């Protein structure tokens, strides 16, 4: 049996691994393994996944590494990319949908997220909802709106996992703030912001590229979960392939 391949056009690769499809797949595998560990499952053969702001890395990892998954639904604001995936992934386990919600970086003309009442997918609930490199580009009002939007799509006992930028240094030195000087040659912020008792709740770190680095204080990131129907289970430090990441469960 021939291993399925999915050749992603360069324009659909995003983030630090843009133009590096091999690195993108490896990153996707790591994120899948992390999510499996969070759920306490060996693989996703019995797991349904809703991947919001899906990009291409997870589906490419699933297909090209032949990783099991019961069901995968990817949703994104990038219409051309979603249409490409719809046309090129011939596997009934996978479904892709475009949502015309606003994102300053990727869909600036879209509908404000707070006005989006539902996703363009069937009335379905999932074992896990993932958002990798989504909250890293969300303003505070969209942070809460995104959590509220996703709440109806989780099964009882399911989990939500999302990455974000936290305005603090970390013991392993793997966070954005730890590596802030690495971004200067690429036109990013020139130095790390001050981090003390007066650390701002939110900082759009590079005004020249709005919401490229949406950075939250730890208390504010946690407070924005309140009233969204989710409860924070834990907020983990960065690893080599993911920034800080929150794990939430359905709450009141």
Image (cartoon, rainbow, N blue to C red):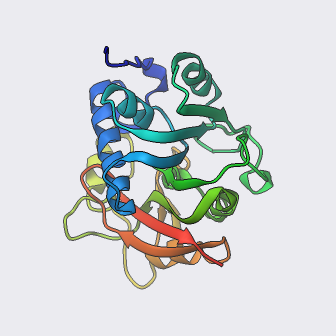
Residue 140, horizontal then vertical, whole percent? 61, 64
Q: Is residue 22 left or right of residue 50?
A: left
Write down the quadrant of residue 105 in the picture. Answer: top right
Write down the quadrant of residue 67 in the picture. Answer: top left
Along the line of sight, which residue is nearer the eye, 68 or 238? Answer: 68
The residue lying at 31 percent from left, 40 percent from top is 29
Give the quadrant of the N terminus: top left
Labels in figure, total: 0
The residue lying at 65 percent from left, 28 percent from top is 79
Placement of 201 over or under 178, stated as above or below: below
| Residue 20 appears in the picture as rendered | no
Residue 160, horizontal then vertical, whole percent? 51, 61
Q: Residue furthest left?
A: 172
Q: Is residue 87 left or right of residue 215?
A: right
Residue 121, horizontal then vertical, whole percent? 70, 41
Along the line of sight, which residue is nearer the eye, 151 or 196? Answer: 151
Q: Is residue 238 left or right of residue 207?
A: left
The residue lying at 60 percent from left, 59 percent from top is 154
Along the line of sight, which residue is nearer the eye, 117 or 249? Answer: 249
Residue 40, horizontal then vertical, whole percent? 34, 62
| Residue 61 appears in the picture as rendered | yes
Give the quadrant of the C terminus: bottom right
Q: Residue furthest bottom?
A: 197
Q: Residue furthest top?
A: 2
The residue lying at 45 percent from left, 17 percent from top is 9
């Amino acid at each position: 049996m021939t291993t399925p391949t999915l050749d992603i056009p360069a324009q659909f690769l995003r983030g630090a691994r843009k133009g590096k499809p091999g690195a993108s797949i490896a990153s996707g595998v790591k994120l899948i393994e992390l999510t499996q560990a969070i759920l306490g499952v060996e693989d996703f053969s019995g797991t349904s996944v809703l991947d919001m702001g899906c990009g291409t890395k997870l589906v490419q990892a699933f297909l090209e590494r032949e990783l099991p998954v019961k069901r995968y639904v990817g949703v994104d604001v990038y219409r051309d990319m979603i249409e490409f995936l719809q046309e090129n992934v011939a596997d009934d386990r996978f479904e892709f949908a475009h949502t015309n919600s606003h994102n300053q970086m990727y869909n600036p003309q879209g509908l404000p997220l707070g006005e989006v009442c539902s996703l363009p997918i069937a009335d379905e609930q999932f074992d896990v909802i993932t958002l990798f490199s989504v909250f890293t580009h969300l303003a505070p009002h969209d942070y809460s709106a995104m959590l509220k939007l996703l709440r109806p799509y989780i099964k009882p006992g399911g989990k939500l996992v999302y990455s974000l930028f936290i305005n603090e240094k970390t013991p392993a030195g793997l966070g954005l703030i730890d590596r802030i000087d690495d971004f200067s040659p690429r036109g990013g912020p020139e130095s790390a912001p001050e981090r003390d008792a007066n650390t701002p709740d939110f900082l759009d770190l590079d005004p020249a590229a709005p919401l490229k680095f949406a950075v939250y204080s730890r208390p504010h990131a946690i407070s924005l979960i309140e009233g969204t129907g989710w409860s924070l289970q834990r907020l983990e430090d960065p690893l080599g392939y993911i920034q800080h990441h929150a794990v939430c469960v359905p709450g009141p």
